[in-house]
Amino acid sequence: NAGVTQTPKFQVLKTGQSMTLQCAQDMNHEYMSWYRQDPGMGLRLIHYSVGAGITDQGEVPNGYNVSRSTTEDFPLRLLSAAPSQTSVYFCASGGRKNTIYFGEGSWLTVV
Amino acid sequence: AQSVAQPEDQVNVAEGNPLTVKCTYSVSGNPYLFWYVQYPNRGLQFLLKYITGDNLVKGSYGFEAEFNKSQTSFHLKKPSALVSDSALYFCAVRARGSTLGRLYFGRGTQLTVWP
């Protein structure tokens, strides 16, 4: 009963470092996405994918990179971390029944 | 453009009283509408959705929501609040025909139920 699995749960980075947030889903969903959650801002879409090999930008894509080589995995890469990227990151996936399921979140602090 | 407004940052109710968390939306055409709940340090959990049909939608944990097309609203309700309902609630919308799964979220409403 895994659903959407994100790792790591917590991470502290120094400015300029790079890292990858991992996301995997076991529901054979076509759609996967990454959101960031900041206080008072709700959730904002970073990147999304509608299938393996297909990705597109959301509202706030700058500083992030994604790829979708398999249906199951959708990693989010921070190329050169900045303090403005301190946030909580959520991976989500969805299938044809119009319901999106979220992972438990990754708390990222950039110092 | 699609957008969601949750006009109240906070809602406080006494346990046992009915609760309402408000949501209005703006979308071209007919919408898909969703409510999610987030407990501290957790991910978002799906509560309920409106796709088509009956305007009153029933969901998890005794919650329900009423779709009102003329008022473009989708308010979340529960007849009798519990302390354990205290959490952050998000309304979300997606336009029919738009990219699968591309939801637009409100800013969230913090619900506090006091004993």
Image: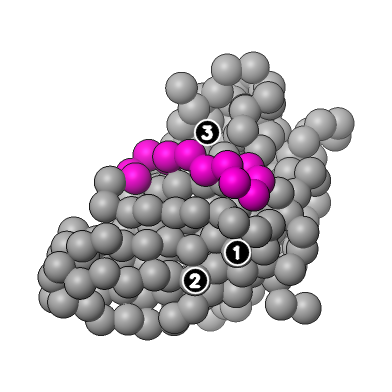
Q: Which residue is mark 3?
A: B24
Where is residue A69 drawn, in percent x and y? 59, 56
Is B57 drawn above or below residue A86 in the view shown?
A: above
* Foreground residue among A19 and B65: A19
**Crowd tier of the residue under label 2, counting other residues whose Cα lies within 10 Å: few below 14, some 14–19, many 20 or above:** some
Q: Earlier in the sequence, mark 2 or mark 1?
A: 2
The Cα–Cα distance between marks 2 and 1, rounded to whole angstroms, is 8 Å
Side of B3 relative to B83 (left or right):
left
Do marks 2 and 3 both belong to one polypeptide chain?
A: no
The one nearer the camera, A56 or B99, is A56
Instruction: Tell me which amino acid carries mark 2.
Output: Gln
Residue B40 in view of the camera: no
As displayed, is residue B73 above or below residue B41? above
- Foreground mark, 1 or 3, reads 1
Kind of residue sitting beneath label 3: Thr
- In contact (CB < 8 Å): disc 2 and disc 1: yes
Res. A46 mark: none
Of B53 and A37, which appears nearest the observer? A37
Image point 36% across, 75% down: which residue? A107
Element class at badge 1: loop
Q: Is residue A55 magenta?
A: yes
Which disc, if any, is residue A73?
1
Q: Which residue is mark 2?
A: A22
- Name the side, left or right, on which A27 lies relative to B86: right
- In the image, residue B69 sits, relative to residue A82, either above or below, namely above
Q: What is the x, y in percent for residue A49?
A: 57, 46
Instruction: Tell me which residue sits at (77%, 36%) in the image.
Output: B51
Label 1 CA crowd tier, 10 Å (few <14, some 14–19, many 20+): some
Among the 4 quarters of the image, the one containing residue B62: bottom right
